[in-house]
Image (cartoon, rainbow, N blue to C red):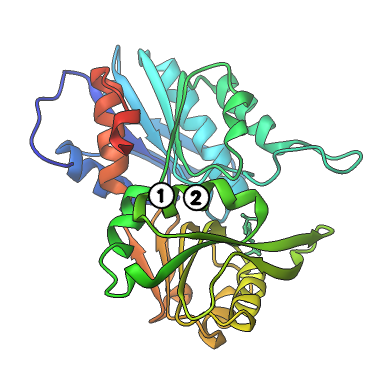
């Protein structure tokens, strides 16, 4: 996807501080340099940010992912977009490999904020003219925007990897809860393997889940659990337990966002899991490295989506 192509004038890519490696890789695929930005702090801890090249009438893409420190990175992104708008960029696309507050997408308890919607409003207020993101926890988040949202999927990247497993013809794709059955179904369809799902219920706000049973036949089958993200790996451990009880053989995991916080790595290390495959939407900091965790790059996918957005070509056709 990164092959040579003729860029129209005036495509520029900038990055915040959250995942510079991904931004560099995207630019390498596009064969353009990453835009220059100076970021520093005033004595009072306020962010000072200056775009260090002209963006007048340019089609600008700004990459920032919601990695820790999440709030700092959000504010930096908003300031970056505002600075680009003030500098007369003609169009600004917020490229959000991991959407901030993606799981706060509904009012399911009294007196809480739908923070994913607040993020959309802030991005618009700052000056974002469109959004490019991947694997939203719920695709309905697109409706929080009144500008175009391109929602990528990691299916081509993860399926390309899993399709090479020697045991792929004996595998079952597993959705770790009913909510992710549609997403896991896309993987099952692309890999041409059966689908099963786990009956999981969430208890309160404290990342605690109750996992009951597997719906579908996994006995004597290898399984690949497909999820949008692994955060504390609590849901994953529940799924692994019931899959083992149901007689599954080797257990693989594929997910887009390797949040991997709190006890996640320790849990994965101890669990009877063969391999966890994540993408680089979030940086894998050294404490998250583990021989069981493999990282695939979504940079070529984002680069191609940026190229197509810039040149006015279909993004949907990337997934067929
Ligand atoms: C849940 O609805 C999501 O799809 C993931 O399963 C969840 O975000 C993972 O969180 P944790 O790893 O903390 O269980």
Q: Is mark 2 within 8 Å of ligand 1?
A: no
Q: Is residue 150 visible?
A: yes
Hey, which residue is sitting farthest right in the picture? 110
Quadrant (top left, top right, bottom left, bottom right) of the N terminus: top left
Q: In the image shown, does 253 or 40 lie closer to the viewer?
A: 253
Tell me where residue 169 sits by quadrant: bottom left
Percent x, y of residue 159: 34, 56
**Residue count near mark 1 (Cα–Cα under 10 Å), binned few <14, some 14–19, many ≥20:** few
Question: Residue at the spot x=53%, y=72% of the render?
Answer: 218
Percent x, y of residue 232: 63, 68
Q: Is residue 196 left or right of residue 113?
A: left
C-alpha span from label 1 to label 2: 6 Å
Q: Is residue 36 visible?
A: no
Tell me where residue 150 sits by quadrant: top left
Query: Which residue is the site of mark 2?
Result: 185
Query: Which residue is the site of mark 1?
Result: 189
Q: Is residue 202 left or right of residue 154?
A: right
**Residue count near mark 2 (Cα–Cα under 10 Å), binned few <14, some 14–19, many ≥20:** many
- Image position of 293 with respect to 315: above or below: below
Badges 1 and 2: C-beta atoms under 8 Å apart?
A: yes
Question: Residue at the spot x=61%, y=24% of the render?
Answer: 143
């Amino acid at each position: 996807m990164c092959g040579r192509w003729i860029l129209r004038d005036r495509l520029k890519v900038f990055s915040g501080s959250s995942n510079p490696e991904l931004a560099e890789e995207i630019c390498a695929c596009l064969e353009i340099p990453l835009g220059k930005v100076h970021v520093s702090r005033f004595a009072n801890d306020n962010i000072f940010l200056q775009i260090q090249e002209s963006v007048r009438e340019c089609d600008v893409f700004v990459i920032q992912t919601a990695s820790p420190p999440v709030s700092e990175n959000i504010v930096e992104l908003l300031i970056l977009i505002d600075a680009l708008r003030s500098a007369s960029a003609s169009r600004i696309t917020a490229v959000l490999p991991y959407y901030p507050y993606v799981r706060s997408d509904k009012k399911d308890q009294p007196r809480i904020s739908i923070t994913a919607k607040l993020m959309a409003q802030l991005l618009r207020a700052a000056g974002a003219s469109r959004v490019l993101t991947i694997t939203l926890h719920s695709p309905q988040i697109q409706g929080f925007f009144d500008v175009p949202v391109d929602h990528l999927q990691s299916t081509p990247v993860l399926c390309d990897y899993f399709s090479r497993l020697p045991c792929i013809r004996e595998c079952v794709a597993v959705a770790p809860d009913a909510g992710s059955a549609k997403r896991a179904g896309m993987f099952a369809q692309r890999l041409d393997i059966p689908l099963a799902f786990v009956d999981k219920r969430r208890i309160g706000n404290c990342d605690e889940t109750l996992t009951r049973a597997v719906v579908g036949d996994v006995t004597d089958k290898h399984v690949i659990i497909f999820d949008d993200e692994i955060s504390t790996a609590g849901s994953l451990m529940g799924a692994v337990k019931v899959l083992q009880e149901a007689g599954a053989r080797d257990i693989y995991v594929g997910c887009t966002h390797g949040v991997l916080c709190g006890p996640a790595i320790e849990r994965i290390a101890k669990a009877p899991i063969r391999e966890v495959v994540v993408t680089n939407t979030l940086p894998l900091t050294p404490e998250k490295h583990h021989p069981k965790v493999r990282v695939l790059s979504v940079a070529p996918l984002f680069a191609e989506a940026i190229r197509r957005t810039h040149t006015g070509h279909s993004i949907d056709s990337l997934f067929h």
